[in-house]
Image: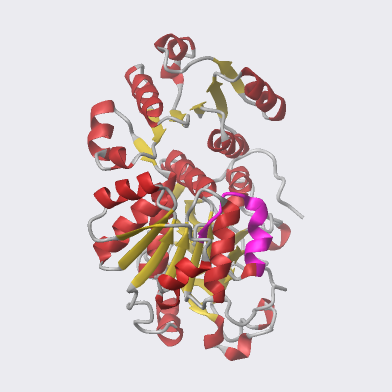
Amino acid sequence: MKVAIVGAGKLGTKISEALLEGDHSVTIIDKNEELLYKLSSQMDVMTVVSNAKQISTLEALEIDSYDYLLTATNSDEKNIVIASFAKKLGCKNVIARVRDPEHMNQIDFIKETMGIDYMVNPDMSITMEIYKYLVEKYTLSNGIFSTGKIALTEFNADKLPYILNKPIKEIYTYISGMLIVVISRNGKVIIPGGNTVIHAHDVLYIIGEKNRVMDFNSKVRDKNKHSHLRNVMIIGGGKTGLYLAQKLSEYGVAAKVIEKNKERCEYLSQMLDDVLIIHGDATDSNLLDEENIDEMDAFVTCTGFDEENLLLALMAKQKSVDDVIAKISRASYATLIESMGIDVALNPLEMTSSHILRYIQGSKRVVSSQLIQGQAEIVEIVAEKNMEFINTPMSKLKPPPGIIFGAVNRGLDVIIPSGSTEIHPGDRVIIVCLLSNIPDLEHMLRSGKRSFFK
């Protein structure tokens, strides 16, 4: 498959890396010659130093021979125009990254008028994950998998005290016929192995045959535990703060936004009718106390600075707020997040990359996908004969630590993988993968080198 990417920033680079692992041909277009030279020395991509807004550039590239074009420059208008030009010139599918709320309010009209197939918004992606966590709490057991035979649910490990402080391989007598595929621990999502020890307060995601999971779910989940979300404090009135406040307000939650910039506060007041907008510095603990932080059901930090988001999240945890969520862009902060005890940390770059890759792969082998707390992805695929793990016992496979095979649906049977399990062509396979391991997953799903073997 041929893919063109306009914009050699973080998103363009991450998508390129993942696509190359999937054995696709990638071309990156940017005006920054130095940046492109650096990328071409690190990756097997074709680079074009040019302005993609010029039709002559797209024509010289023979854009009509490309399957996909992604526009990821720093300008919404450029992204929309370039994607539209490419579509008119014959590119089969075009994707544009947009951020502006005004564009999102008329997204269907823009897509139809400009001929854009898919538009992705990092801030809206973050918003929807926060919303799902606070309002829906990831009740995934109803129909996430297209087969209708496999389900997944989550529960707090404290519900089964006898599994605490034990490695996973020792607790399957208590949850026979199901598999723990994800652990959420202090804001960090972990793909567990057999020796991973269950801690108190861990949230476990378990997969299995639907009826078995539903029966288990009825025993371990708190009924209506999350139905009383009333007060949410949002720090940062940027695009994520705006989208989230709007969404929560529509749901009936009393949302409160604290923003430093006075002009931005005035803009938010115009855009949000039923949301309290406060002009102030949230790092001032006195302000947080005055605004009754201790009465909040949830506290969300989404400023443009990771360090500030982490500091404020820590302050909220010290105030015993039930749910504390932080927007964090640097993957290197993962260990720090776990030690701080934040409930959820979301990385907009990794989430946006996941959405784009699933759109590109969706028409091929990926049947469905779902994010878990914005850090991991559950993917349902149809196994093909050329995939490298076909007809090989699980005991001989060695996927990266961030990837786990969750379940296999073969005809009428649901198989929870063991060492002797083999995946056959035509099987529907549920795979769970950390977003940081998506390039490894793409590599695993392609034909060619068999590199994930013991």
Determine which quarter of the picture holds residue 167.
bottom right
Horizontal arrangement in the rendering, residue 116 relative to residue 388 (left or right): left
Q: Is residue 333 magenta?
A: yes
Q: Magenta span: helix, strand or loop, mainly?
A: helix
Q: Residue at x 56, y 29 (%)?
A: 8
Q: Position of residue 420 (x, y in %)?
A: 66, 66
Horizontal arrangement in the rendering, residue 127 relative to residue 195 (left or right): left
Asked whether residue 218 is in view, the answer is yes
Q: Position of residue 22 (x, y in %)?
A: 58, 38
Closer to the camera in the image, 338 or 290: 290
Find the residue positioned furthest to the bottom: 162
Up/down of 432 relative to 115, above or below = below
Instruction: Quadrant for the C terminus, please.
Output: bottom right
Range covered by the magenta-colored residues:
326-339
Q: Is residue 249 magenta?
A: no
Asked whether residue 432 is in view, the answer is no
**Number of numbered callouts drawn:** 0
Q: Residue at x 34, y 52 (%)?
A: 243
Determine which quarter of the picture holds residue 147.
bottom left
Q: Residue at x 69, y 40 (%)?
A: 449
Up/down of 379 relative to 343, above or below = above
Up/down of 355 relative to 160, above or below = above
> What colouring style does the render use?
secondary structure
Closer to the camera in the image, 189 or 271: 271
Determine which quarter of the picture holds residue 173.
bottom right
Q: Position of residue 396 (x, y in %)?
A: 72, 58
Find the residue positioned furthest to the right: 454
